[in-house]
Image (cartoon, rainbow, N blue to C red):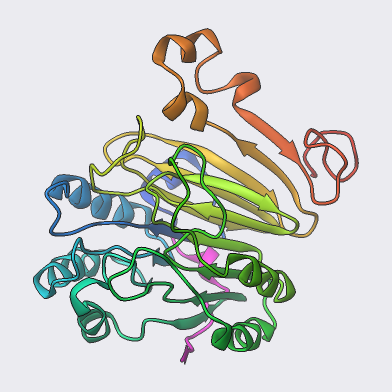
């Protein structure tokens, strides 16, 4: 199930995107685009948003594109074909896709395997290991990894790597602002323990259409929104994530097609230090007047810092509250 490829440790020597060159900024060592929940075939699917996402990603020139499922609305072949055509337009060395619960409807997993390949796989690039697992169950909204896969996960993550990513469709931790929790991964607790044992640094998922980030011990869990569907909760907007690895710094930003971007979380895997930018209350839970009264997208509601093992969320590992140099 492992798909091996060439080393891209020299990827930072590639020419920087035009905008970065103009600004004199160096290209990060690794750029990963995280898209999710296209829902092709849904009446809420917006082609112009997907077209714009493709254009923006091609301007970004990511090294990896990771898609965490729900490519289709009902698992029909013609919708899989449409999703495949969109994703094929993204100019990227590697595309890794897992199916979601909507893709497993109407025996849709057979079309996934025909058009995208194995539903679970692993990939290694430049010292980074990505393990992608199908968490869907046919015609059900719930997710599950299953005990039969735990040993395989540990085997895949056992190989030497400077950074380890686990990707699936369903969320392993509840996502705020998404209503009643009813279809998280059934064996989430066991899976989280396996990932912790395997030294995983980052979990990527979709499903709830709300971007968010958690830190659990040494593990960072990041959820993506939907990049091109109007199946939205509250006042969320279509978006996708851009993850950059540059030395020991990992930055996750959410990008809005046609619009700007904002930082979701920054962290340092070697120490567990992190800075979390919390926009959820302003974007989803607060009315506009309340948002303005509390300071908009920044301020006390907008940021949280901490580190693994620190006694308070406001301190980093050295207890100063400052980011490591």
Would you say residue 205 sits in the magenta stretch? no
Q: Is residue 299 visible?
A: yes
Which of these two is toward me, 11 or 223? 223
Q: Residue at x 64, y 30 (%)?
A: 303
Furthest residue to the left? 78
Q: Is residue 193 left or right of residue 243?
A: right
Residue 159, percent across and down?
67, 86
**Looking at the image, residue 298 lies above or below residue 164:** above
Q: Is residue 27 visible?
A: no
Q: Residue at x 59, y 43 (%)?
A: 265
Residue 222, percent across and down?
53, 53
Would you say residue 6 sits in the magenta stretch? yes
Which of these two is toward me, 293 or 75? 75
Q: Main secondary structure of the magenta part?
A: loop
Q: Residue at x 82, y 41 (%)?
A: 316
Which residue range is magenta in the image? 1-15
Furthest residue to the bottom? 1
């Amino acid at each position: 199930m492992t798909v091996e490829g060439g080393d891209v440790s020299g990827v930072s020597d590639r020419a920087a995107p035009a905008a970065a060159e103009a600004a004199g900024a160096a290209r990060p060592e690794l750029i990963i685009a995280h898209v999710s929940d296209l829902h092709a075939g849904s009446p809420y699917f917006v082609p112009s948003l997907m077209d714009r996402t493709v254009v923006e990603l091609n301007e970004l020139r990511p090294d990896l594109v990771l898609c965490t499922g729900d490519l289709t609305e009902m698992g029909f072949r013609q919708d899989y074909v449409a999703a495949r055509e969109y994703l094929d337009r993204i100019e990227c060395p590697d595309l890794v896709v897992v199916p979601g619960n909507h893709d497993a409807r109407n025996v849709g997993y057979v079309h996934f395997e025909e058009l995208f390949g194995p539903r679970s796989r692993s990939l290694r690039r430049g010292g980074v290991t990505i393990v992608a697992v199908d968490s869907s169950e046919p015609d059900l909204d719930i997710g599950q990894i299953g005990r039969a896969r735990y040993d395989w996960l540990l085997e895949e993550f056992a190989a030497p790597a400077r950074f380890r990513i686990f990707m699936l469709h369903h969320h392993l931790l509840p996502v705020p602002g998404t209503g009643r929790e009813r279809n998280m991964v059934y064996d989430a607790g066991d899976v989280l323990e396996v990932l912790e044992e395997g030294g995983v640094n980052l979990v990527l998922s979709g499903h709830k259409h709300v971007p968010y980030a958690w830190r659990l011990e040494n593990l960072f869990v990041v959820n993506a929104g939907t990049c091109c569907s109007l199946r939205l909760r509250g006042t969320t907007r279509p978006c996708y994530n851009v993850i950059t690895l540059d030395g020991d710094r990992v930055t996750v930003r959410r990008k809005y097609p046609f619009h700007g971007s904002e930082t979701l979380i920054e962290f340092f895997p070697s120490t567990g230090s992190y800075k979390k930018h919390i926009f959820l209350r302003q974007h989803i839970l607060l009315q506009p007047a309340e948002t303005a009264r509390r300071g908009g997208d920044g301020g006390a509601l907008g940021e949280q810092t901490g580190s693994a093992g620190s006694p308070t969320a406001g301190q980093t590992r050295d207890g100063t509250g400052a980011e490591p140099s």
